[in-house]
Image (cartoon, rainbow, N blue to C red):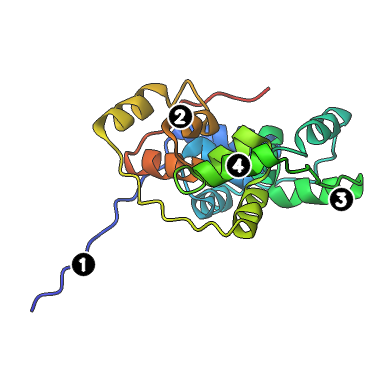
């Protein structure tokens, strides 16, 4: 029996991508943020940065970033805040602890009824967005209510793919995830499989 070995297609880096990568490193953006911009893995970003001999220094928090963190801390996931600020999740959590932020959003009976109705039908990220709770909080209250998830894998339709191709450069992964009822990870993974790349836009 002949063993078939499948070769994975390697996506080569373009000169304009290298230029954008260097600019983002100069701006001290975290690798997770950069990976999302390029629709590549964090490992791919690290390898390319190493080959280009890119390094980054320590980046101090600004009063504006503190303000954003305090504004969204109670109802947005750490991952979302990290993307907004261009920092790592670890950095966001560390600063939140440093300035004394604690999460405690009371659950109302209406919130619990909403979770009971939609938990088996919608992703936790969507419910978290609707109710202004974190995804972890959604899952904890679902466990408390005795709910289990049995969501079948949502396949990509032709119209979904067309929408993704058309709006990838116009919308963020979070907006696309909300519109298509998927996770940001699913959006990034599909874009990567389709070899789609956001057009470089330098952050000033």
Label 3: how many residues lie within 10 Å, few (<14), some (14-19) or many (20+)?
A: few
Q: What residue lies at 42% left-to-right and 32% top-to-bottom?
A: 180
Q: What residue lies at 86% left-to-right and 50% top-to-bottom?
A: 97
Instruction: Examine the image and state in which quarter residue 4 appears.
Output: bottom left
Label 1: how many residues lie within 10 Å, few (<14), some (14-19) or many (20+)?
A: few
Q: What element carries label 4?
A: helix
Q: Name the residue under label 1.
A: 5
User: Which comes before the other along the chain, label 1 or label 4?
Assistant: 1
Residue 175 is situated, as x and y percent measured from the top left of the image, at 52, 28
Disc number lying in front (3 or 2): 3
Mark 4 to mark 3: distance in Å?
32 Å
Q: Name the residue under label 2.
A: 198
Disc number lying in front (1 or 3): 3
Label 2: how many residues lie within 10 Å, few (<14), some (14-19) or many (20+)?
A: some
What quarter of the picture does the N terminus occupy? bottom left
Mark 1–mark 3 CB contact (< 8 Å): no
Residue 129 is situated, as x and y percent measured from the top left of the image, at 61, 35
Residue 71 relative to residue 87: left or right: right
Q: Mark 3 points at which residue?
A: 97
Q: Name the residue under label 4.
A: 113
User: Which comes before the other along the chain, label 1 or label 3?
Assistant: 1
Residue 154 is situated, as x and y percent measured from the top left of the image, at 35, 45
Q: What residue lies at 37% left-to-right and 34% top-to-bottom?
A: 196
């Amino acid at each position: 029996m002949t063993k078939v070995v499948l070769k994975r297609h390697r996506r080569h880096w373009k000169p304009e991508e290298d230029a954008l990568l260097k600019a983002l490193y100069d701006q001290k953006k975290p690798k997770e943020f950069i990976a999302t911009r390029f629709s590549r893995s964090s490992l791919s970003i690290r390898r390319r940065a190493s080959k280009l001999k890119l390094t980054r220094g320590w980046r101090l928090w600004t009063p504006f970033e503190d303000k954003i963190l305090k504004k969204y801390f109670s109802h947005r996931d750490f991952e979302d805040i990290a993307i907004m600020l261009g920092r790592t999740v670890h950095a966001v959590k560390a600063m939140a602890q440093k300035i004394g932020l604690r999460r405690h959003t009371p659950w109302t009976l209406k919130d619990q009824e909403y979770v009971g109705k939609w938990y088996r039908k919608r992703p936790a990220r969507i419910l978290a967005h609707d109710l202004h709770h974190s995804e972890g909080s959604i899952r904890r209250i679902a466990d408390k209510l005795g709910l289990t998830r049995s969501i079948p894998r949502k396949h990509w339709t032709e119209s979904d793919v067309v929408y993704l191709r058309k709006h990838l450069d116009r919308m963020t992964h979070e907006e696309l995830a909300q519109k298509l009822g998927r996770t940001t990870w699913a959006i990034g993974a599909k874009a990567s499989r389709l070899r789609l790349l956001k057009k470089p836009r330098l952050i000033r």
